[in-house]
Amino acid sequence: MKKLLAGAAMTLMALTGGAAQSQDYPDRPIMMMVSYGAGGATDFQARIVTMTAGNEDALGMPIAIINKPGAGGRVGWNWFATQADADGYTLAAYNIPHFIAQSIEGGVEYGADSFEPIANWGADPAVFVVAADSEMNSMDDVLAYAKENPGKLTFSGAGLFVGHHIAALQLEKAAGVKLAYIPTKGGGTAAMKAVIAGDVIAGVNNLSDAFRAREAGNVKILGVFDLERNEFLSDVPTMKEQGLDIDNASVNFRGVMVPKGTPQEVIDKLAATVPEMFANDRVAKKMKAGGSPMHIMTREEVQAMWQARQATLEELLAGL
């Protein structure tokens, strides 16, 4: 009986201790893993949307960004799903459709059920870019070259089964052409550098990266892979406007998630606080200045979005 009572007491202490710990959360700085390199769109935006985390009206503790790039995000997300502590002090940035498409294709140790979404901060469409001195000035020019030179139109993107790759597959199907998609090491930043340097004829990249590159006079943006024109690029037509049956399946949603198994009290605290943190005026101004479209969504809205994207991508990838 004494052993039984002692065991019960220890269990009660562990439970109350865990509750107290969750109640005091966070009581130390938090790390957020970005599975792409420093300077790319995800890293750039993650540093902006977390910059007010230490404010008393936010989490009251700073968030430090840690980069674990490689294989189109697979390296970081594999680590996060299998090795990250589920204690609320290790967060990660997610990219949709990237990690869902990768899990559908296989060869990774994660899926949507490996993580718990917290909140979404942005929606970044893919765009088609060429160097500023390119003779191509429209998607008609691009596709005319592709039809005359099957498989020889080289263009870069941030990896396999990321938004850029999905956009490329959709473009091939919609236009009935064979293209040469080249996934680059180093994410969107490296993919953009390949276009500017002339290593490839064109590229598919994030609108936010392309916006900054166009502002610097380095690229032309010929089309947007979305259903409507974007406020940052009101002069650039969508693919649909240019006669191509391409939807918004490649739009890159970005947000914050935690590993499965994180205490519910911690998830609830983050889910209540993080969307408000994203809505901070300083954050909005810096995101706008960087050409980074914001799209704030709550945990429940993200859960619904993940589920919808899972169904869409399973159908899309089966067809491609």
Image (cartoon, rainbow, N blue to C red):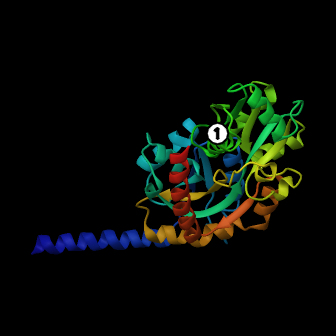
Residue 15, horizontal then vertical, whole percent:
33, 71
Q: Is residue 143 left or right of residue 101?
A: right
- Determine if residue 287 is in view: yes
Q: Residue at x 25, y 69 (%)?
A: 10
Q: Is residue 291 above or below residue 5?
A: above
Residue 118, horizontal then vertical, whole percent:
56, 64
Question: Number of marks in the image?
Answer: 1
Tell me the element at label 1. Answer: loop
Q: Is residue 233 left or right of residue 46?
A: right
Q: Nearer the viewer, residue 23 or 289?
A: 289
- Neighbor class of circle 1 (other Cα within 10 Å; few <14, some 14-19, many 20+) is many
- Mark 1 belongs to which amino acid? Gly
Q: Residue extending furthest left?
A: 1
Q: Nearer the viewer, residue 171 or 297?
A: 171
Please state, as top left, top right, bottom left or bottom right, where the C terminus lies in the image: top right
- Determine if residue 58 is in view: no
Please state, as top left, top right, bottom left or bottom right, where the N terminus lies in the image: bottom left
Q: Is residue 283 left or right of residue 59?
A: right
Q: Residue at x 78, y 49 (%)?
A: 243
Q: Is residue 24 above or below residue 231?
A: below
Q: Residue at x 74, y 48 (%)?
A: 244
Q: Residue at x 58, y 38 (%)?
A: 160
Q: Quadrant of residue 287?
A: bottom right
Q: Nearer the viewer, residue 267 or 291?
A: 291
Residue 109, horizontal then vertical, whole percent:
42, 45
Residue 91, horizontal then vertical, whole percent:
54, 55
Residue at the disc numbered 1: 37
